[in-house]
Amino acid sequence: MKIDKDTVDKIAHLARLEVTDTEREELIGDMGNILDFMAKLNEVDTTGVEPLVYMTDTVNNFREDVLKQEISHEEALSNAPVHDADYFKVAKVIG
């Protein structure tokens, strides 16, 4: 695929970017280099190479899920601008 002025303009429009003429010329070169690099990668024989899913052998390295009561029900309701005895009151958003 050849990167030209129209392609850069279309991508800039989709990305909601304003691009000057100087930036457009730089982007044409940069995008062309990216596509050339991708074409070079497509030439590499990857037969028999497993896809890389994780960068390390560590699996599910999460902290233990511990239940703790940090704030009481009453304390939570005291922070609400409007509430009743049990719930926060909010403005109706569905008609």
Image (tube, rainbow, N blue to C red):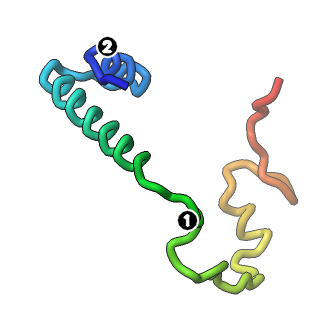
Residue position marked by numbered label 1 in the rendering:
49
Q: Nearer the viewer, residue 69 or 77?
A: 69
Farthest-out residue, top? 6
- Which badge, 2 or 1, is on the more N-terminal residue? 2
User: Looking at numbered disc 1 in the image, what kind of residue is underneath it?
Assistant: Val
Q: Is residue 2 above or below residue 67?
A: above
Dot 1: element: loop
Dot 2: element: helix
Q: Which of label 2 and label 1 is nearer to you?
A: 1
Report the quarter where the N terminus lies: top left
**19 displayed left or right of 58:** left
Give the percent coordinates (x, y) of residue 2.
Answer: 32, 23
Give the percent coordinates (x, y) of residue 69.
Answer: 75, 81
Q: Residue at x 40, y 27 (%)?
A: 15
Q: Is residue 93 above or below residue 53?
A: above
Q: Residue at x 58, y 64 (%)?
A: 48
- Label number found at residue 6: 2
Instruction: Write down the quadrant of residue 52 in the picture.
Output: bottom right
Give the percent coordinates (x, y) of residue 53.
Answer: 59, 66
